[in-house]
Image (cartoon, rainbow, N blue to C red):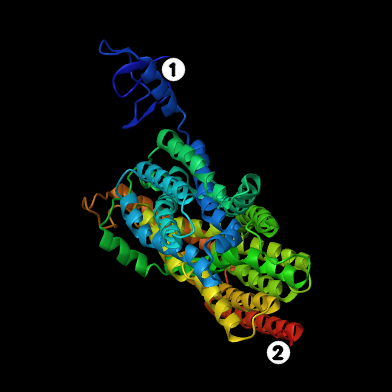
Amino acid sequence: MCVESDGCEIEGCSSSDEVHTLSGSMSPGLKSSPDLHPCKPGQKFRAALLRCRSPAAAAGILSFGNVLNYMDRYTVAGVLLDIQRHFNVSDSGVGLLQTVFICSFMVAAPIFGYLGDRFNRKIILSCGIFFWSAVTLSSSFITKEYYWLFVLSRGLVGIGESSYSSISPTIIGDLFTNNSRTMMLSVFYLAIPLGSGLGYILGSSAKEAAGDWHWALRVSPVLGMTAGTLILFFVPEPKRGHADQLGGRIKHRTSWLCDMKALAKNRSYVFSSLASAAVSFATGAFGMWIPLYLFRAQVVQKTAEACTKDICSSKDSLIFGAITCVTGLLGVVIGAATTRLCRQKTERADPLVCAVSMLGSAIFVCLIFVVAKKSIIGAYVCIFIGETLLFLNWAITADILMYVVIPTRRATAVAFQGFTSHLLGDAGSPYLIGLISDALQKSYTRSVLWQFLSLGYALMLCPFVIVLGGMFFLATALFFLDDRDKAEKQSPEEEPSLGGSRGSACCAERGRMKERERERERQLIHVFIPKPSTFNFFVLTTLIITFLIQHVVWRLLLFITGKRERFV
């Protein structure tokens, strides 16, 4: 027999079970009381819902919501040609859609990060999903005379989706710890490539089935409403830092200004955020422009006709979406497995795996623009390998943040990492690529071949940004151990809090024991950790080799394409 929060008896529950209520958990040892009364049917249903709030189910629901977030974001990219023709806008004009979306997303992220550290997170998540679902559905009815209104609607959708991306990882961080948290975050971040790929597929398929691209924007809102309802009823609201509590004591919340100062001094957090910006720059540009680039390549090869009809070919969007799904799944799984394996050799495994994958990805991204003019299949192969390496770092980057930031600052840290990555990354990359492409097209005689080459030259900016991201991950590796240890050592008595010092001699002794254990671990694995001079030499050598390869690839590209006068 167990008791609900309103004093009714729940049938079918043993006395040894613990019941989770909206206000907390009830003791398993409660006995019958004269004040108890049988539950009404509605109360029994509510109690059954509460018993379904397992951490694994919550992580699954949050991952499903993340899939929908990215699916809605890239549905527009799946019908980009149709939108461009419908509203009669240029490359830079259509690139403005993604830029406005990301700008509103990143501006709202710090606000939701502040709210997520102080108020009920699942309520904020549900409201955000309901909001963007309603706006997306409304935008499907905008006529071609009001392109500015369509752009504005994408900005509002960005605000709604910002609440989800800023807060949901922190709930998973409070439900799990150590390797289980890495695994659950990997599942959560699988939603990024899966949702992105499904966005292309959904947009193209809905357009083909209905004969109108507007229907591509009317499917994800229905699924979004479903996800918001599931979060409202089945996702618990765990105590902040529940999985990282020290001696039963959870670290206390500090002021917002104190949080920002601490994050600014956290070198691993700063460098990993800059590296995330490089990833966002590349993925944002690729997601918007690669399908169109490959379509123009086929027009140049005379294997496809230029889009002159109201409904354009969606084959490239479908293929690119499928590749994104598969490479995303492979990348996140391989990244998590590789990191777990490398942790046996070095404690710097997380940032080092990210750095190596970024530098390797840059090489294959360069090759896309070398082979696309001659072989579409070769371009798809390079996209497959390049995206797989690029997607390796998503879950690992989130895990780095969980290691180096204390629990009561994680929502703010996730929000500002998102703000930084979007501000310096995909907020401007789609528009910037479109702007460079338009400028190149207007500079010379307009032709189909020059349209293809100008977009390719603009996209060549991406691999150089990816190399820069790899450098930032290498910098993260230099400071990762120190910042992780600082976060672990900040016990309640050491952390300035709103509630004052609550430390004890027991907590201090426990901290000293953990410090001795960490020192023994360092001695055991010291042989695998390079000295600072050796590590710096490795970093410098890697960067030089990477830049040389990039230079050779660029020269090869110019040699294959020849002088531009031959094409214009």
Quadrant of the frame with the C terminus: bottom right
Q: Which residue lies furthest to the top in this view?
A: 34
Question: Which residue is located at x 29 percent, y 22 percent?
Answer: 6
Quadrant of the frame with the N terminus: top left
Residue, disc 1: 14
Residue 367 falls left or right of residue 260: right
Front: mark 2 or 1: 2
Q: In which quarter of the image is residue 360?
A: bottom right
Q: In which quarter of the image is residue 83?
A: bottom right
Question: Which residue is located at x 43 percent, y 53 percent?
Answer: 157
Across and down, in percent, residue 14 comes to 44, 17
On screen, residue 483 above or below 219: below
Question: Which residue is located at x 48 percent, y 67 percent?
Answer: 96
Q: Is mark 1 on a helix, strand or loop?
A: loop
Q: What residue type is labelled 1?
A: Ser
Q: Badge 2: how crowded within 10 Å, few (<14), some, or many (20+)?
A: few
Across and down, in percent, residue 350 comes to 55, 62
Across and down, in percent, residue 82 comes to 59, 59
Across and down, in percent, residue 151 comes to 44, 61
Residue 3 falls left or right of residue 300: left
Marks 2,1: beta carbons within 8 A: no
Question: Which residue is located at x 45 percent, y 33 percent?
Answer: 53
On screen, residue 440 above or below 389: below
Residue, disc 2: 565
Q: What residue type is labelled 2?
A: Glu
Residue 13 makes an appearance in the image: yes
Q: Label 2 to label 1, Cα distance in Å?
A: 82 Å
Of residue 87 and residue 472, the one placed in the foreground of this image is: 87
